[in-house]
Image (cartoon, rainbow, N blue to C red):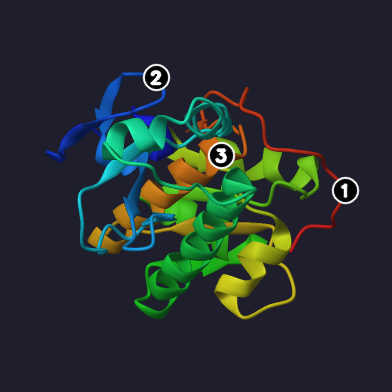
Amino acid sequence: MARGGRTKEREAPERRCIATGARDDAARLIRFVAGPDGAITPDLAGRLPGRGIWVSASRAALDRAVAKNLFSRAAKTSVLAPDGLSDLVESLSARRFVDLLSLARKAGLAIAGFEKTRAMLRAGPVRALLEASDGAEAGKAKLRPLAGDAPRIGCATAAELGLAFGRDHVIHAALGVGGLSDRVLDEAGRLAGLREIAVTSSVNCASVTGPAGRADR
């Protein structure tokens, strides 16, 4: 299983990271383009015109690309990366993840709340189990066995998940099977990489999901 819970069944283009030299699925890298003013701009949606410059979705790779001036080398001209690029990309990825999850909710593919999540897991199949990184561990442990080998996504906070569902905070959620769900998981994989949080199956509960502390919701 690939990071972000994606399977290898979907054919996806590969790109080379300018920081590591490794080739990977484009969905697990961040695309950048150089603007007319010579500024490097993140393009998470992959829609901006221009030649793409690709960096792995990790802080280490982004920081290396900036420190070694690798964007200019890739662009074959002098370009400027903004200060705090890693923080900017993480913020954009978190926003995109929330927006995509909100779209999945509106499409009837995502539900939230402990009881609704448990019911969906029992009915199955699900594309992923989502749990807030700052949620209480006890509630999460009750749901994980029901998810089987579905990926467990713990890269977002309760407040971020809440934004997607129109609530103050959400601890437990589930994502059904559908094309839009794959896009949610792609962005979850990027965000997890940027936050150095593992995404794994619920059968293997050894992933890092962040500190506990909130009541279940």
Label 2 Cα neighbours within 10 Å, binned few <14 / some 14-19 / many ≥20: some
Most extreme residue toward the top, as rendered? 21
Q: Position of residue 16 (x, y in %)?
A: 26, 28
The nearer-to-camera label among 2 and 3 is 2
Q: Position of residue 186 (x, y in %)?
A: 36, 47
For residue 194, the mark is: 3
> Is 94 on the left or on the right of 122, as rendered?
right
Q: Give me the residue at 54% from left, 23% from top.
A: 204
Of the residues shown, which amino acid type is indicated by label 2? Thr
Q: Give me the residue at 40% from left, 74% from top.
A: 103
Q: Give me the residue at 45% from left, 43% from top.
A: 190
Helix, strand or loop under label 3: helix
Query: Which callout, 1 or 2, points at the residue further toward the start of the chain?
Result: 2
Residue highlighted by disc 1: 213
Q: Give me the residue at 59% from left, 44% from top.
A: 86
Residue highlighted by disc 2: 20
> Is 119 on the left or on the right of 55, as rendered?
right
Helix, strand or loop under label 2: loop
Q: How many numbered marks are there? A: 3
Most extreme residue toward the right, as rendered? 213
Indicate whether 199 appears above or below 139: above
**How far is disc 1 from disc 2 in space, using C-alphas?**
36 Å
Of the residues shown, which amino acid type is indicated by label 3? Leu
User: Does residue 146 show up?
Assistant: no
User: Does residue 105 show up?
Assistant: yes
